[in-house]
Amino acid sequence: MEQPRIAYQSERCTLYAGDCASLIGQLPTVDLLCTDPPYGIRWNSGNNGGRFGPLLGDDGSLDVPGMLGALVRSHLRPKRHVYVFGFQPSQLAESLQLGGTSELIWDKVNIGMGDLSKPWAPQHEPITFGSHHPSKSSRASGGGNLAARLRAGTIIRVPRKNGTQVNRHPTEKPVRLMAELIESSSRRGELILDPFAGSGSTLVAALLAGRHAIGCELDERYVEVAVQRIREAERIADRIEAA
Ligand SMILES: C[S@@+](CC[C@H](N)C(=O)[O-])C[C@H]1O[C@@H](n2cnc3c(N)ncnc32)[C@H](O)[C@@H]1O
């Protein structure tokens, strides 16, 4: 298998261009796995699908649960958290082999196009949250609690981008949404992994929140977009640190 090339590298962030399967066993230990993989549904709807063309790896041939399971076992620090967009806990529980998985919902606030023959328009997306089960004594001493903010409900309301705002990637996630997950499950200076980085939203959110990040993206068009966004996020992070 061809090794991914390094498309961007700094003290805080590395972005690989290539197939993330080739990185299994080659990465450092990370503190959080937070990713939005191809959903395997041949995503291609409305204006965006037409404009961007099909997503790589979205034809169902990619074993996303198997690949994420291998990344967790090889690279995730024990007792840390996992977030996976677009998959139900039942699809991932067996392969992730964590203590438990549960469902979060991203409430996109604004409805999408979806199937126009149905009376319901899509407004949400599942996110599988994977974590270990801390023991009673560990819970009592604050073990397993990584949150940088107060506990919140399992429905996360962050407006989706509308058709005119989505201009970098067809399934681009809002940075504010990614920041909610990252700040709930990691501390400043820790390392966040997104093996299906797309336009780099997870990496940007991680850098702006004072974390370090590793990403990988197969489609060169989005590698280029992600590099530009990461550079800008690093400039902002530098200014925040210097203030
Ligand atoms: C759902 S999108 C991620 C979008 C991202 N969250 C964003 O905000 O831009 C999934 C991405 O995974 C990429 N991909 C597909 N197969 C891959 C592989 N084997 N290794 C790395 N990236 C892959 C696709 O090109 C696509 O950009």
Image (cartoon, helix red, strand yellow):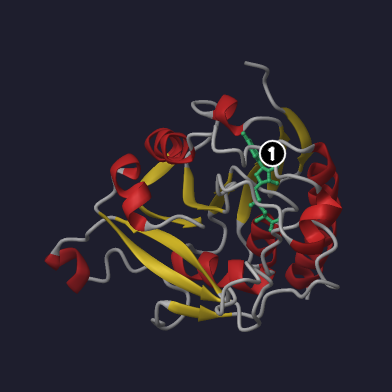
Q: Is residue 211 above or below residue 141?
A: above
Q: Position of residue 129 (x, y in %)?
A: 39, 61
Q: Of 144 and 165, which appears nearest the observer?
A: 165
The reply to whether the residue tagged 1 has its Cβ within 8 angstroms of ligand 1 is: yes
Evaluate whether residue 230 shows in this view. Answer: no
Residue designated by label 1? 56
Q: Residue at x 86, y 54 (%)?
A: 51
Q: Residue at x 79, y 50 (%)?
A: 226
Left or right: 243 in relation to 128: right
Determine the residue positioned at 66% across, 82% down.
110
The reply, left or right, for residue 21 in relation to residue 201 is left
Circle 1 packing at 10 Å, graded few (<14), some (14-19), many (20+), is some
Residue 62 sits in quarter? top right
Q: Position of residue 178 (x, y in %)?
A: 60, 66
Q: Which is more toward the observer, 85 or 25?
A: 85
Ligand 1 location (quadrant): top right
Helix, strand or loop at disc 1?
loop
Across and down, in percent, residue 34 comes to 52, 54
Tell me which residue sits at (41%, 82%) in the image: 152
Q: Residue furthest front?
A: 117
Residue furthest to the left: 136
Between 206 and 20, the one lying in front of the other is: 20
Which three-letter amino acid code belongs to the residue tagged 1? Leu
